Image: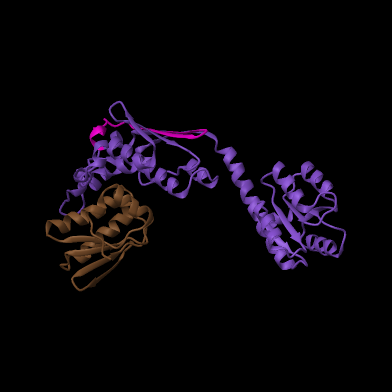
Chain colours: A purple, B brown
Amino acid sequence: MDQAATVAHILLAGQEDESREDTEKFLVKAGLKFDFVSDGQRALQAADDIRYDLVITDLALPGLNGIDLLRAIKQRKPEQAIIVTSASKNIDLALEVLREGVSDYLQKPLDFDSLARSVERTLSEVRLREDRDRLFRYVREQFTEYTCTSAELVGQRFPLMIVEKLFRAGRIDLDTKLKIELGFQEALVNSLEHGNLELKSEWKEQFNHEGIDRYTSTKRERLQDPHFSQRLIRLRIQLARNILSINIKDEGPGFLYKEYLSARDNPAKLLCYGRGMALLSNGFDEVSYQGRGTEINMVKYLTAGC
Amino acid sequence: MENYETSIVGEKGYIKVSRDLDSEQSGEALRRAFNQIYEQGKRTIVLDLQDVQIINSYGIGKVLMCYKHLKAENGVLMVKPLQGFVKETFELLMLDKLLPVEE
């Protein structure tokens, strides 16, 4: 059993028999804390009163049988992890139990290696779900603001922590995460390089006698020039329930953003420019510029299928 | 300095890109690999991007630079079959209509 499993609290519901003693020995040896009840009604009461990490119940219980017990528990606490044990060899019964959403069904007499694996796997799933629920609550609302100079930002991959948290909380899938991150980085590079440093895309194809393109050489020069390098980038990242919005503002002269936005549907134009804009538009549901193009707003609606 | 694996088979040159194409370093490594094959006179060059998970506008720009160099001399830039995010990005930017796939 791993560290997390040793602090787990288990409700063991079963008959007073030899199997119960063996199961208790197993739980003690595994360092797990448990309460034992031998009656279905008392088991239900205990599950109501205490937040158990796991319920292990036999199907044959006096008072309230195992299948009625697990149904009653699932009705009250749908997320409750339950492992069912039974001496019955009835396949239909086993299938009926599994359809109720239990974590595992183990045949008696118990193989304690199987029980150990089942308990460990179930507790690990419980921990994972709890972590995700905790993160989910944490990432419902957040507002962050940053201000950096161009010189501080250049060459850095700005970490979009909120997106990582949303992904870990299960609120966005990997594909959405990658698209948002890529779109954000494209927008940031646009504001930094085309905005504050005033670099032109076409310079990437103009080379000097040393084979260095004009874009790269001018970028180096401008990062040494305080007029360009000390211009600021302001970032506002906000999550309000299901809306993630990112605002980036630069101090450059602006650009013809409408021309770039229209390039995304034109293969000939995309050969020359507008690729970054197309990628950033792909990461968000809404993209809009303000003023001369020195401020961009990007919005992503987080939906269940997102 | 990072270098990508290059090879020549018959009249074709091959470049295997072994990391994400999303930085100046990875883009420069592609340019060096391309020049190495181009200078050997090969005008059909195949990019293998199967190990690439992320490509951004910088990486796309380098791919297009290779494409334009070859096209200017009636050459062809091809790609090995793409997958996942890279495939989607190529389709989004309509590069799939520009670069034939070597099956």
Q: Image quadrant of residue B71?
A: bottom left
Q: Is residue B22 something that shows in the picture?
A: no
In the rendered view, tell whether residue B40 sits above or below residue A181: below
Q: Left or right of A164: which side holds B25? A: left
Q: Quadrant of the N terminus of chain A?
A: bottom right
Residue B27 appears at what percent x and percent y? 29, 55
- Confirm whether the magenta stretch covers residue A106: no
Q: Which residues are magenta?
A: A236-260
Which residue, as the protein is rendered here, is positioned at the far top? A291
Give the percent coordinates (x, y) of residue A295. Answer: 34, 30
Q: Please, which residue is most extreme toward the left here?
A: B73
Q: Residue at x 25, y 55 (%)?
A: B63
Q: Nearer the viewer, residue A274 or B89?
A: B89
Of the pair A80 and A9, the residue shown nearer to us? A80
Task: State whether residue A192 is above or below residue B90.
Answer: above
Task: Please tell me which residue lies in front, A170 or A236.
Answer: A170
> Could you say where residue A165 lies in the image, as x and y percent from the top left?
52, 44
The quadrant in which residue B37 appears is bottom left
Q: Is residue A280 left or right of residue B31?
A: right
Q: Is residue A125 left or right of residue A43?
A: left
- Which residue is located at x 83 percent, y 46 percent? A41
Outermost bottom residue: B10
Residue A226 visible in the picture: yes
